[in-house]
Image (cartoon, helix red, strand yellow):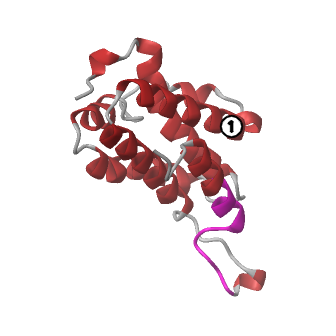
Amino acid sequence: MTRRESFNAAEWTLLGDAPLAAGAAVALASPGGGRSEAEAMMKGWRAAGEHFAQTELGAEIVARLDPERRPESGAARYAYASIVEEAVDLCGRAVALLRERATLEELDAYREFVIHLAEHVAWAHNEAGLFGVAAQSMSLDERAMMSTIARALGYGKP
């Protein structure tokens, strides 16, 4: 079983920043949302954490890297213009790190955690259709960003 002590400080921060950057990238994929998507990120962290915390590593990440408890996450330092590239990079690096040090079960749980958090953000803001008709909860841009994040995580791959 993988524990917190298996990672240095920078690696540990990476494991917390990747999900936040993924959520931010989804939030920025489509205009609007703002506050509702920011609130969804915090709620999504906890909701996703309920599933992810089934492993010891997952429980530590959820509890110790909670964005509301950290003074400043690394993801918050990135410029909005580059958040997508940063999210893809952070997610890819986090998965590569976990491939080296974590069990396959922990890796899969982490991927699920990131996807669940990003989906929570994507569903937070209703996107209006033409003249408010045919509104949907996740825009096409957000769906595309979800696919980008899933690919960066190697979602569905061993």
Determine which residue is flagged by label 1: 83
Q: Using the image as rendered, state which of residue 47 and residue 158 is in the foreground.
A: 158
Q: Amino acid at mark 1?
A: Ile
Q: Secondary structure at mark 1?
A: helix
Locate residue 54 relative to residue 121 in the image: left or right.
left
Q: Relative to residue 134, is residue 14 depicted above or below?
A: above
Residue 128 found in image quarter: bottom right
x 41%, y 21%: residue: 12
Q: Report if residue 143 lies within the magenta region.
A: yes
- Work out which residue is located at the far front of the displayed protein and give it: 158
Locate residue 140 relative to residue 98 in the image: left or right.
right
Q: Position of residue 24 (x, y in %)?
A: 59, 44
Q: Report if residue 112 lies within the magenta region.
A: no
x 40%, y 47%: residue: 113
Q: Position of residue 150 (x, y in %)?
A: 57, 51
Q: Which residues are magenta?
A: 134-145
x 63%, y 56%: residue: 147
Q: Position of residue 11 (x, y in %)?
A: 45, 19
Q: Using the image as rendered, state which of residue 153 and residue 70 is in the foreground.
A: 153
Q: Position of residue 157 (x, y in %)?
A: 50, 48
Which quadrant does the C terminus fall into?
A: top left
Locate residue 77 relative to residue 131 in the image: left or right.
left
- Work out which residue is located at the far bottom of the displayed protein and give it: 133
Q: Using the image as rendered, state which of residue 156 and residue 123 is in the foreground.
A: 156
Q: Relative to residue 117, is residue 74 depicted above or below?
A: above
Q: Using the image as rendered, state which of residue 70 and residue 153 is in the foreground.
A: 153
Total labels drawn: 1
Q: Relative to residue 43, is residue 70 depicted above or below?
A: above
The answer to whether one can see residue 71 in this image is no
Residue 126 found in image quarter: bottom right
The answer to whether one can see residue 69 in this image is yes
